[in-house]
Image (spheres, rainbow, N blue to C red):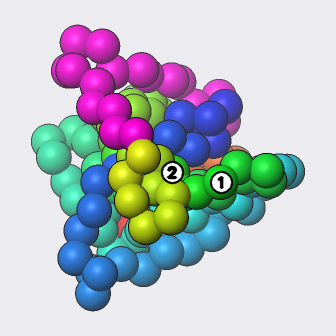
Amino acid sequence: MIRAALIISLFALPASAQTWKPVPGAANASLSIDTAGIKREGKWRVFRTRTTALGMEGTIIGTVAMDCAAGITELRGQRLLARGKVVRERVFPVAKRPRQKIPNPAKDPAFRMVCRS
């Protein structure tokens, strides 16, 4: 589902521009979206996610894009932060960005948060 893609992405914006809102639904993880940082890029709305999971050391900050009209999410990059440092960073080239169709956008909390803002 969309949560799997969202668990992975976005790059840092200035701290003052962050407004993290929790996305309900993940059983063993905590997912939030930086609603203040949502930006339009053509048909895409690009935003950051922050994920922590039970038993995982660190936080994953992801860069995700959502095509609200098509109901598609695209993973653009991710950073794993632990102990105040970037432990791992991954940026997906345009042709290799993982995409996922959102099965039921009207009921998906992340879709509603991003596309109705």
Q: Is residue 113 above or below residue 63?
A: below
Q: Which residue is mark 2?
A: 60
In magenta segment, residue 102: yes
In magenta segment, residue 78: no
Q: Quadrant of residue 76?
A: top left
Image coordinates for residue 17, horizontal then vertical, percent = 27, 80
Q: Which part of the image, by quadrant, shows the C terminus? A: bottom left
Residue 6, visible in the rendered structure = no
At 29% across and 25% down in the image, what residue appears? Answer: 92
Tag 2–tag 1 contact (CB < 8 Å)? no
The segment highlighted magenta reads 88-105
> Whole-Å distance between the Cαs marked 2 and 1?
10 Å
Callout 1 secondary element: loop
**Left or right placement of residue 11 versus residue 9 in this view:** left
- Nearer to me, 67 or 27: 27
Q: Which residue is mark 1?
A: 57
Q: Is residue 115 above or below residue 79?
A: below
- Nearer to me, 15 or 102: 15
Image coordinates for residue 51, horizontal then vertical, percent = 59, 55
**Left or right placement of residue 44 versus residue 24 in this view:** left
Check disc 2 and give the amino acid type. Ile
**Left or right placement of residue 36 versus residue 34 in this view:** left
- Nearer to me, 40 or 10: 10
Residue 91, visible in the rendered structure = yes
Check disc 1 and give the amino acid type. Glu
Q: Which part of the image, by quadrant, shows the N terminus? A: top right
Image coordinates for residue 109, horizontal then vertical, percent = 64, 56
